[in-house]
Image (spheres, grey):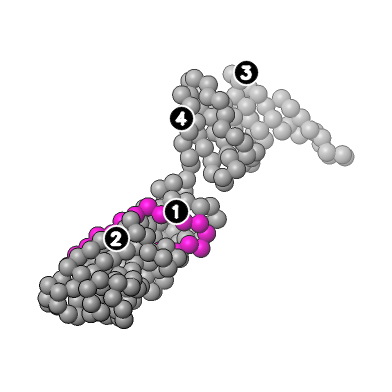
Amino acid sequence: MFLTEATGEAIEEKMRISSTGNVGIGLEPTVNMDGLSIEAGLLTLKERATPTADSGYAKLYSKTDNFGYIQDGSGVEKKIMTSTYACLYVSSSSATTISSSSTPVLVAGTTTEVTSTSDITVSSAGRLTYTGATTRRFKADAGISFESAGNNNDYVFYLAKNGTVIGSSAQQNFIGTGSERKVIPLTCMPELAQNDYLEVYVENITDTDNCTIDYMNFNILAIG
């Protein structure tokens, strides 16, 4: 038993180690409180480098990248992360104006939020902005159904980060007649820092005929 006394105050018990080796800080461990129990409900850890593993034991620690970690007995390190995600859809479609061939532009239409965590801002213009303080890797996906204002047009769709298209996300689709409707999927895994944002862009590489996004869902999910 460990006792403390403030000046002029009564002696108080602050920590106890039971006969079975269980430790209680600010409380007396009950029969079900194995190991360390803290009445204040807070364990403060200094940030540190990855420790050396001990077989059969797990280790809990925090590093300078602002994440917590669990290391198992074999030395495998697992990052502790909160869920970060958002989803929107086109709730009112309108034609995307294409003034120049082979020039990507932001797709038009009014979008509505389906769901999001507090560290993603969803705009009505199809933009998903990450506001978290820690840089993270995301999986971004969009499903698009579109039509053309003209015939015989090749359209290329992209996911774009901060207004710049992500080349690896490009998907192309050809519309022979304006009455056709095509479906196209987009996916990529960009890294986003605080206030980076993602949008969907399109270009007509054949002509300047506009296109209309009839349906679109667009979502991002933090994966690292």
The relative height of residue 136 versus residue 42 in the rendered view (above or below) is below
Of marks 4 and 2, the one in the foreground: 2
Q: Which residues are magenta?
A: 182-198
- Magenta stretch, main secondary structure class: strand
Residue in the foreground of this view, choosing between 150 and 16? 150
Badge 3 crowding class, 10 Å Cα cut-off, few under 14, some 14 to 19, many 20 or more, is few
Q: Position of residue 22 (x, y in %)?
A: 60, 24
Mark 4 to mark 2: distance in Å?
36 Å
Decide if residue 110 is on the left or right side of residue 38. Answer: left
Mark 2 to mark 1: distance in Å?
17 Å
Give the residue pinned by disc 4: 76
Residue type highlighted by circle 1: Glu
Mark 4 to mark 3: distance in Å?
34 Å
Give the residue pinned by disc 2: 170
Mark 2 to mark 3: distance in Å?
65 Å
- CB-based contact (under 8 Å), mark 2 and mark 1: no
- CB-based contact (under 8 Å), mark 1 and mark 3: no
Q: Position of residue 161 (x, y in %)?
A: 42, 63
Of marks 4 and 3, the one in the foreground: 4
Residue type highlighted by circle 2: Ala
Secondary structure beneath label 2: loop
Badge 1 crowding class, 10 Å Cα cut-off, few under 14, some 14 to 19, many 20 or more, is some
Decide if residue 122 is on the left or right side of residue 103. Answer: right
